Amino acid sequence: EKGLLMLFNPLNESITRTIKVPVYYTGLHQQVKVSDQSGKQEVLKVTRDYCIELKTVIPAKGYKSYILE
């Protein structure tokens, strides 16, 4: 495990977003295996500026966490 991402939604409705996550300091420079709290995994490619683009759905007044490997 190289990184942890926590996202919080303070709104009264769930939201879907694609966010740009910097991963430079994780040491992962080619690809990142992203696992959510339910165990679903996906491999994302790191861009030239050391970021990944992650599409996420965050429940109303809830949070979502991801482990980066």
Image (cartoon, rainbow, N blue to C red):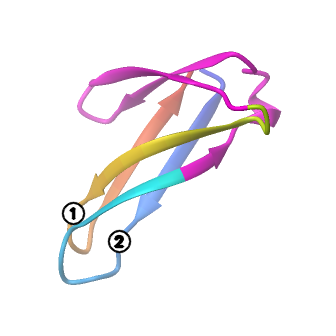
Q: Position of residue 7 (x, y in %)?
A: 45, 58
**Which residue is rendered at x = 18% and y = 77% of the image?**
13
Q: Tell me which residue sits at (35%, 34%) in the image.
A: 36
Q: From what the image shows, is residue 26 above or below residue 16?
A: above
In this image, 37 relative to 66: left or right? Answer: left
- Magenta stretch encompasses residue 33: yes
Quadrant housing the N terminus: top right
Between 47 and 69, the residue placed more toward the observer is 47
Q: How many marks?
A: 2
Tell which circle, 2 or 1, labels the residue nearer the N-terminal end. 2
Residues shaded magenta: 20-47
Question: Can you say whether 42 is above or below 52 in the image?
Answer: above
Q: Amino acid at mark 1?
A: Pro
Tell me if mark 1 has few (under 14), some (14-19) or many (20+) residues whose alpha carbon lies within 10 angstroms of its own: some
Image quadrant in which you'd find residue 38: top left
Residue extending farthest bottom:
12
Q: Which mark is residue 6?
A: none
Residue picked out by circle 1 = 59
Return the x and y of residue 55 as percentages of the image width and height.
38, 46
Q: Is residue 47 left or right of residue 64?
A: right
Q: Indicate left or right for 66 with 23 as reference.
A: left
Name the secondary structure under disc 1.
Answer: loop
Q: Which amino acid type is marked by label 2?
A: Asn
C-alpha gap between disc 2 and disc 1: 7 Å
Q: Which mark is residue 9?
A: 2
